[in-house]
Amino acid sequence: MTRRSIRSRNPQDPRASMPRGPRFRRFRQSLAIVAGVSLVGIAGVGVLGWTTYAKLVADLPSVDSLRAYQPPTVSRIYASDERLMAQLANERRIFVPIDAIPDKVKRAFLSTEDHNFYTHGGVDVMAIARAGMTDVFARHGRRPLGASTITQQVAKVMLLNSNVLTIDRKIKEALLAMKIEQVLSKDKILEIYLNGIYLGNGAFGVAAAAQTYFNKPLDQLDDAEAASLAALPKSPTNYNPFLHPQTALMRRNIVLDLMADNGVISREQAEQDKKEPLVPQQKQRFGPLQDSEWFGAEVRRQLIGQYGEDKALQGGLEVHTSLDQPLQVSATKLLHEGLMNYDRSRGGWRGPVRHLDGIDAEGWEDSLNRLSPPAGMLREWRLGVVLPGGSKVGWIEEGVSKTGPLLATDLSWARRMHPLRAGDVIMIEPQESGSAALCQIPQVEGAVVTMDVRTGRVLALVGGWSFHESQFNRATQALRQPGSSFKPFVYLTAMEQGISPSEKFDDSPVSYGDWHPKNYEHDNWGPTTLHDALRESRNLVTIRVAAHLGMKAVADTAIKAGLVDQMPHVLPAALGAVETTVLKEAAAYASIADGGHVVTPTLVDDIQDRLGNVVWRAPGLTLATTLQAPPAPPVDPATPTIVPAATNAQPAPAQPAPTQPAQPVPGSITVPALTDTRPVLASEASAYQITAMLQDVIAHGTGRMAGVGIDRPIAGKTGTSQDFHDAWFAGFSPDIVTVVWIGFDTPQTLGKNADGGRIAGPIWNKIMKVALANRPRLDFRVPADITLASYNTGRINATDGFKADQVPGASVALHGFGAGTEALTAADTGADAAISDSESDMGDAGPQTTGPTSNPKAQAQKPAPSDGDIGVGGLY
């Protein structure tokens, strides 16, 4: 028997052994399962990780925008003398190139925020590891430490624009940081960071922060101040030296230690800098130049309309305007005086601002200090309280309490309507004598525009009584009827059609239906020259002139001048029954003064981008160069002049003009030349004829009050709308035009006889005196094709300009004279109470006549008596 055959089969026999095959098979199977599951898990994690990575990468913003990154910076508006007038910004930010940022500032931020900035590739792995260990072992329950590099902060702020603390955001931040490092240089990344970081108190970037906290430019900061700025990124609010001085000081000292640890400064220097007190200096917030708010707001509105809000307020534009600041201040003051004079003469004292009970001669200061002044109170006024007795007032000036008597005239003025009582809070203006003048905010409003005649540059613009009370600009936004100040454009149309200033039109009653136009004086002069009619603002002559010309021609002139955008072809419009603005009327009058060129008003001379490139310049006039031939040599009188003998030969036919430009004369020099590309409103001769007549409006007509004390050549026209709702005076010198308007925001009468000559004329007079004070005396230029002649108009001796085909002083029978006044229709006069857009040319209405007078029947018609039948449009 063999050994195999005698092996015990008893399972209890220790010599017996278990079969080995099945046990190792199960082990191998388990190991295979574990390995398989692990491989599947790893593959799944890999797929998931790759999917997540692909999704994160797909959602990443492009870093290419940082190549040409330009942070939003403040736009600045300058007056004509280059003084800073206003700043436009949503954020206070000053961009400084990296080369201009001092090394001490850069080193302070690098030591605090990222001392390995110039060695890592966008992500600092060691810093992340340190932060992770600290978060695990030492910061239980607290916000995790960050380990973001400066590049990661740029990615977060400039590209991700998110502060949400999530794993996804941190991964995106790291991926973007590495991409940024591949695209931009280290210096460019640091430049973006130092100009874009928010450092509290409304300051973005280190330059704005230096001004905000220390009122210094960057290059004047010392190490301690630079460290104070570098302390802010961690928490701009908690380390704000204005809000938390002790905490800010402690954080600054930590930054100084970090600077010493990184070898930026020595340890001794750090200890010395720690002893320096942290005393922030409040920077005075810049405000607009005095009285320039109306002008600046209009420039801002135009910039936003032209470039959009983002570029206008954050594009770093340098806007150079035409504002004459001294003239603006004077115009504002003189308009205030005019409105106060009207308010005082036409209305009484309207009572105190409020009343305080229990006011004694002592201890009133606290009660007065708690009151806020009304929005429309002028800066030179003060709130005062009437003291016991009713004749003395107390006020506070620069923290010092003062008392003084009220002017006797003011006491009488107040006594008529609202006698003063102790405790009344009033507005006063302290006087040099120690007394006080009683003041009140007028209810009437006004507007002023002064501009350069040649260029249209607006020199001064006042839009109302107070910009702080109401920002509605009455110079540019209020549409009002110009009244008789529209009439010069009717007469300009007549001059363009060859009618002379001495031509006579009939000044006699005319009526149709319910429309009964009258002259302001309710009288009639019969045949009247255009010179006298414009000088004395005769309505009935103007109506007949407009009817003869055709209202379409008048409307075309007004529209081309920019006075109106559109105009109905009805006769009342010739009397100013249209709507315009003060700025538009100033430009239209400038077109007359400038010899018939259309003048476009501009507030901005040019605009530069942040790099100094001119991106816009006012159109119309451009400066070029031309070649000027040398002067001809003097003629020697001893040299005989040879005159060719006369012949019977026919003159040679005219040769066509050469197509090639003529060669410059030897010795020619280059000189400046002004290129004028503006459209033409009227001929220079016609514009001068109107100017000459408007000179007599001031010298002998309705505008006499506007010319008092001015010894320069000036011309102008009064304007008064229906029922005295609007008072205008528009006038000009050879180089300056000014328009003044007075009225209520909600149209109502200014009062009996409150016409433009009395209300607006004196204000115009004072403003023009200021505007002309420092300018040379100029005369209106007489065109070469105009003959000046004096003649008797039948009322005065006048001097006018006449064209070559006109007989000075003569009145000739005009073809179609008076057309339209004999057969007016409702559509022609607007009497149908609806102005249609389909009105026909007034020149085609009614039969034409050739006589010097209108139809006798038309003259004989008498309007029914009425208080309001002077007619729609201008009065005077």
Image: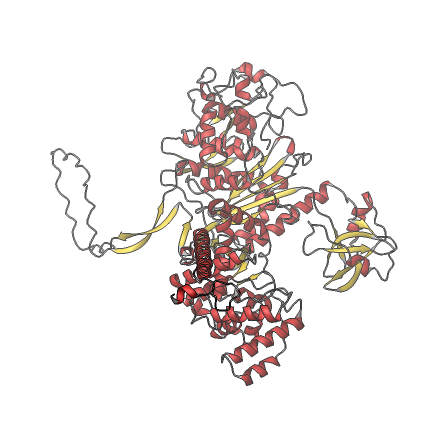
In this rendering, would 806 be left or right of 205?
A: left
The answer to whether residue 76 of the structure is visible from this angle is no
Point 52% across, 16% down: residue = 822
Residue at the extreme front: 1
Q: Is residue 775 above or below residue 14?
A: above
Tell me residue 159's x, y (percent).
48, 56
Q: Quadrant of the C terminus?
A: top right
Q: Is residue 106 above or below residue 295?
A: below
Tell me residue 435's x, y (percent).
77, 59
Q: Quadrant of the N terminus?
A: bottom left
Point 56% across, 35% down: residue = 482
Tell me residue 614's x, y (percent).
40, 54
The answer to whether residue 531 of the structure is visible from this angle is yes
In this rendering, would 76 be left or right of 614?
A: right
Tell me residue 70's x, y (percent).
45, 58
Residue at the extreme bottom: 268
Q: Is residue 57 above or below residue 255?
A: above
Q: Quadrant of residue 801?
A: top left
Q: Quadrant of residue 757?
A: top right
